[in-house]
Image: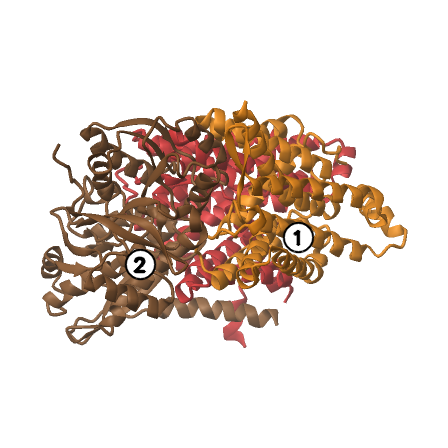
Chain colours: A orange, B red, C brown
Amino acid sequence: MSFWIIQTLNGLSFSMMLFLVASGFTLIFGLMKIINIAHGSFYLLGAYIGLTVLKATGNFLLATLASSIGVVLVGIIMQRFFLRRFHMKELQQVLLTFGFVFIIADLCLWIWGGNPQALPKPSLLKGSIWIGSVVFPSYRLFVILVGILVAIGLWIFQEKTKFGAIVRAGVDDEEMLRGTGINIQVVFVGVFALGALLAGIGGMIGGPFVGVFPGVDLSMLLLALVVVIIGGIGSLKGAFLGSLFVGLVDNFGKALFPELSLFTLFAPMAIVLAIKPTGIFGRKEE
Amino acid sequence: MKKFEILKSPLLLPCLFMGLVLFLPYFFSNYYVGLVIQIFIMAIFALSLDILVGHTGLPSLGHATYFGVAAYATGLLYLAGIKNFWLVMVVGIGLGGLTAVLFGFLAIRALGAYFMLITLALSQVLWGIAFKWRSFTRGDDGLPGIGRREIGLGIDLKPDLHFYYFTLILFLIILVALFIFLHSPFGYALRGVRESESRMKALGYPVWRYKYLAFVFAGIFAGISGVLWVYYSGFVNPSYFGVDLSAKALLMLILGGSGSLLGPVIGSGIIVLLENIVSGFTERWSLILGVIYVVVIMLFSEGIFSFIKKR
Amino acid sequence: MRKHLLMMMVFAFIFSFYSGGQRVAGAAEPIKIGYLAPYVGVFAKFGNDLKDGFKLYLEEIGYKVAGREIIFIDEDTEGKPEVGLVKAKKLVEKDQVHILAGIISSAVAYAVRDYVIEKKIPLVITNAGATKLTQEQRSPYIFRTSFANGQQDLAGGWYAYAKMGVRKIIMMGSDYAAGHEKAAGFMKTFKFMGGEVVEGIYPPLGTNDFAPYLAKVANYVGKVDRTWAFFAGSDAIRFVNQYDEYGLKEKIKLFCEEGVTDEANLPSQKDAVLGVESYARYSIGYDSVENKRFVSEYRKRYRYDPGSLSEGGYVGAKFIVKALEAVGGKIENQEAFLKALRGVKFEAPRGPVRFDDHQNVIFSTFIQRVDKKDGKYNNIVIDKIPDVDQYWMPKK
C-alpha cells in the first residue's frame, strides 16, 4: 500500500513541476503561435538567478522574487524588441528563439560555470515526513501544493479577470480582438512575460530536486513539448491534465517496468500524435 | 571599360566556382577539404528542406528525422557487416523516405505553427528511441567506427580526396535533379500551393497529395545527406535527430534565401564555415552562434542571396 | 550596414584560409600541443577542469622545456565525435601541432584514434576511459594518463568484499558504455571473491527523478549490505540527494565510484553526501607532499577545489613534458620521443604513476569518505590500494 501512496505522490510532484514549465509554453503558443524554443532557457535563468540570491541572502522568497523579475525582464525584451517584428511569421520567430537558446545558455555557462548545482531547499521544508512505514520528502509535498495553487491562480486569471477574457478572445480570434480597440501589443507582451515567469518559477521550484546545469534548458523544453502535445496545444486545462498524465505514467512506468522507460514518455506522445494531433484537450484548429 | 566586360558574363560565377571546387584539394590541406565536404552534405540537407519550406510553404522543424533515420540505417547495416556500399546507401535513403511516408500522414494535416510543432514532436519521438533503446541503437554512446568502402570499379572512398569528389558529384547530380523537379509542372503546382492553397483547391488540384509527395521527396533527399554524413564522420548518435540540426538547416535557408537552388547552398556554406572558424577563435563561439541567429533573422530575413540580387 | 557586415564576413573567411603557417624544423621552433575537450553543454565543467589542470603544469614550467617554447592550442569538441575529428584535423593540418592531448568522451577518442594513427601524431588521452583504446585497439601512438573504465573499479570490487565485508550488493549506474564498463569491472572482482549481485538498476543518462528507482532499492532494506553507484555530473547530485531524502542513506550504505562524490558535486549534495564512501583514482585528501602542494597551487590559481579531472589534466601534461625533457626537446625525433614517453615515471598528486605495456597508466586506488570540516565538504582518504593496472586481479 505504502508503495502506491509514495509512487503516486512522487508522480504528482513531478507532474506539478512539469505543469509550471508547460503552462507557460502553451500560453505563449496559444495566443501568439510562437514555438518558444527558449522556454527552457527561462527555467535555466530563473534557477541560476535564484541560486545566486539564495546563496547571498538565504531567503527563498527573496530569491524567487529576484528570479521572477529577471526572467520577466528577459521575456519582455525578447518579445518587445525581437519577436514582435515578426508577428505571425512562425519560421523567423522559431529561429529567433533558437538563437536565444544559444545566447542564454552560453551566458549562463560564462557567468555561473558548467558545474551542475542544486538549489538549497528552504529550511522549513528540509525534512521528510512519515507515510505509513516509509518516508517522503516534505519538499515534494510543497511542490505539489505550489503546482495546484498556480493552476488555480491561472484558472481564476483566465476565467474571472478581464485580462484573462481578452487573452481567451485573442486565442479564439485575434482579428476580432484587434477590432475592439484593445492594445493587443500590451496583451502580447503581458502573456509572453507571464509564460516566462511560469518557467522561471519552475526553475526555482524544480531547482532543489532536478537541479540546474547546462543542458537542463533543452530537457525541460522536451518535457514541456511532450506534455503540450499530449494535453492539447494552447490549452491550459490540457497542460494540467497532460502534466498529470505524463508525470504519473513516467513514474509508475519506471517503478514497475524500469526496462521499458523508453515507452513511458515517448509512446503516449506518438500515439496522441497519430490519433489526435491537436492533443487530447486541444481545440480543432482552423 | 571593355576589359571588364567579361566580368559581367553570367557564366563567370559558376565557372569560377566549379574551377575552385574541382581543384580545391590541390591548394588546401585536408582540413579544408573536410570542411567543403561538410558544406556539400549540409547543402543537400538544406536543399531537401527547401522543397518543403521554400517551394511548398511547409516550415518543418523536424527535418533531422529523415537525416537521422538514414544515418542510423547506414550505421547499423555497416556494423552488421553488409559490405555493399550501394546497398547500404539505397536502404538508408529508402528508410529515410519511408519514415517520411509515415510521418507525412500525421504532419500534413496541420498548418503553420502547428505543422512545426508536430514535426518537432515526431523528430523527438525518434530521438527518444535512439537515446533509450540501447540494445538496438546503443543509446547515447552512438555507433562509432563506420568506415567507407569500395564502391565498385576499383574506387575506394577511404581517402578524403576520393570522398570529396564523390560528394561533389552527388551534390551536382542532386542540384540538377532538383532543378528538373522544381521546374516540372509538379514544381509549379507546389509553388501554387505555397501561394494559395485555397485557390489551388478551387482549380481542382489535389492539394493534399501534392503536399504529401513533396514531404516524401524531401525525406528522401534528406536521407541522402544523412547517409553521406555518416560516411563522412564515421559515427552516428542521437543528436542526429536533434532540434538544433533541424533549426540549423532552417537558418541556412533563411540566410541564403529559400525558394531557390543557390540560396540553401550559400547558406550552408556560410554557416559551416562560421561554425568551424569562430570556434577556433574563442571559447564563447556558442554565444556568437546565437547572436548570428538573431542578426541573420533581424537583418537578412529574406536571404543574403536576394539581398545581393537587389543591389 | 548590411553590406559592410557581409563584406566583413567574406574577409573573415578569406583571412582564416590564409592563416596557419608552414612547419619549419629547428631547435628554436616552439613545440605545439593541440588540446581537445568539450567546453559547451553537459560536459563543459569536465572540459574546463581538465584544461585547468593541464595548463597549471605548463604554467609551472613557464611554457618552456629544454629551451623550447610550448604553445598550447585548444579546441572545443562539443563532446561530439564528428566535431572532435574535424578539430583534430584542424589542429594537425592547420596549426601543425606535434602532439594531441585531452579528450573527455570515449566516442570522440574512438573517432580521433584512426586519424592520429594514420598521421602518426602521438595522442595523450587525459580522460576518455573506453577500455578498448588501450586494449584490443591499442596503438604505439596512443597513451592514456587517466584510467581505463573498470580499472579502479577492479580494486573497488575487491575492497568491498575483502575489507568492508560486503556479501550482497545492488548495482546502480547510468545506462551508457562507461556506466556498464565500470559496473563490469567492479562486479568482476566482487564476484570473483564470492560476492553476490542481487539487483542491477541502470537509469538513463540525465534522469530527472530517481524516486521511482529508489522505491525498488527500498525493497531490499535489510537484505543487502551496500548499494554500488556510478553517476556523473547533475545525475550524481540528484541521485545522492534523493537517496538521502527517501531515507535510504543509513539503511543501505553507498559505496560509489568517485564520480558520484566528485569535489565539484559536494557543495550541492551537502549533508546528503556526508560520510558516503567511494573509491577513486585521485583523492583530494591524500596526505602527501606533492598532493598538498598541488591542491594549494590549484586553489590559489583557480579558486576552486581540484577534482580527479583536474589532476588528470595535470598528470597528462607532466607525462608529456617529462618525455620532452628526456629527449632534450627534440620532438621531431618521434621514435625517441615515444620511447621516452613510455618510460616516464614520477610522483603525481595521486602517488607514483607509470605506463603499463599497453600504454595505460598504473596508479594507486584510494578508498575515501566525505567529511565536513569548518563547514566545508571534502573527501578524506581512509585506505589505499597500490599499483592498480587495467588488468588488475586480486588473490583470493
Q: How many marks?
A: 2
**SS class, disc 2:** helix
**SS class, disc 1:** helix
Left or right: A180 as drawn, with respect to C102: right
Disc 2 marks which residue? C310
Residue C51 tag number = none
Looking at the image, which is closer to me, B268 or B116?
B116
Q: Say which quadrant the N terminus of chain B sits in.
A: bottom right
Disc 1 marks which residue? A196
Which subunit holds the residue at mark 1?
A
Residue at x 14% of width, y 37% of height: C394
Q: Residue furthest top?
A: A1
Q: Position of residue B167 (x, y in %)?
A: 39, 46
Q: Position of residue C55 (x, y in %)?
A: 29, 66
Q: Say which quadrant the C terminus of chain B sits in.
A: bottom right
Q: Name the mark nearer the viewer: 2 or 1.
A: 2
Q: 10 Å neighbourhood of mark 2: few (<14), some, or many (≥20)? A: many
Q: Do labels 2 and 1 share a chain?
A: no
> What type is the residue that disc 1 sits on?
Ala
Left or right: B14 as drawn, with respect to C155: right
Q: 10 Å neighbourhood of mark 1: few (<14), some, or many (≥20)? A: many
Q: How much space separates mark 2 and mark 1, taking CA atoms?
A: 37 Å
